[in-house]
Image (cartoon, rainbow, N blue to C red):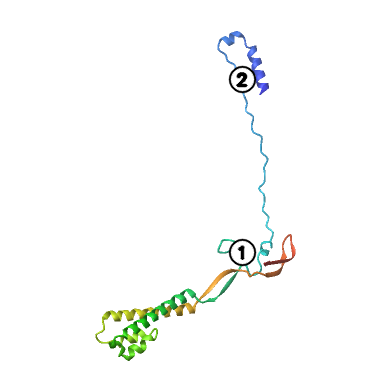
Amino acid sequence: MTRTLTIALTFALSVPCGAAAQGVIITPAYTTPSPAPQPYVQAPVVSYTPGYAATQCPDGSSPQPDRRGIMRCMHLVSGHRVSWGLAGAGIGMLAGGWIAEILTTAFSTLDSRFSSRSDYVGWGYVPIVGPWVQMTDLPPDTNSSYYLWLGFEALLQDAGLILLICGLVGEDYEEYRPIAAGDVRVRPIVSATVQGLGISGVF
């Protein structure tokens, strides 16, 4: 930059005054330095060691997320289990229908029209089939709403019985479960950098 300005100034001094009077203007030249080249930096190469990842979990297990999303060593478990949700709902419906049947029979036998009918009274305390038999032995002048109530009790008990059976029959399942604490296993490790025995487990 200094050399260029010195040459331009020398040239301006050597020009005659007449040339300057004629409107000749000498403008110093400026040069912009080019940026220095940046050295090439190679991206780091992530190396993979065969056999290392396999030692994280014991044989027969693999990293799987648990209910909280945390990766843990888990193994696939299959089997058969009872559906206690269905069984519990069935027991509740069956018990509710049976209690309603007993109360209905107890209060209705206060009327002589019902208490004199042996089938109605005898089957009034039997679950599931009791309400169906009672509907066949009602007095002739019984209100139609009583049939509807006995039918509701019968259907409620039948539905509860079906749910109870389905729950006890259960279902097959396959799911990942954490390895039990204290599971320690020894296995050989052969890789490009490591040869020997590895101990893995859950404590």
Q: Amino acid at mark 1?
A: Arg
> Tag 1: Cα neighbours inside 10 Å, few (<14), some, or many (≥20)?
some
Residue at the spot 62% in from the left edge and 9% down from the top edge: 16
Q: Position of residue 170 (x, y in %)?
A: 49, 77
Q: Quadrant of residue 66?
A: bottom right
Q: Nearer the viewer, residue 163 or 156?
A: 156
> Tag 2: Cα neighbours inside 10 Å, few (<14), some, or many (≥20)?
few
Q: Amino acid at mark 2?
A: Pro
Question: Hey, which residue is sitting farthest right in the picture?
Answer: 196
Which residue corresponds to mark 2? 28
What distance separates the C-alpha of mark 1 from that of mark 2? 74 Å
Task: Please give left or right for residue 81 compared with residue 127 in the image.
Answer: right
Q: Quadrant of residue 75?
A: bottom right
- Label 1 element class: strand
Q: Position of residue 103 (x, y in %)?
A: 36, 81
Look at the picture and state if 77 lies above or below 119.
above
Which residue corresponds to mark 1? 72
Q: The N terminus appears in which quarter of the rendering?
A: top right
Q: Nearer the viewer, residue 15 or 132?
A: 132
Q: Earlier in the sequence, mark 1 or mark 2?
A: 2
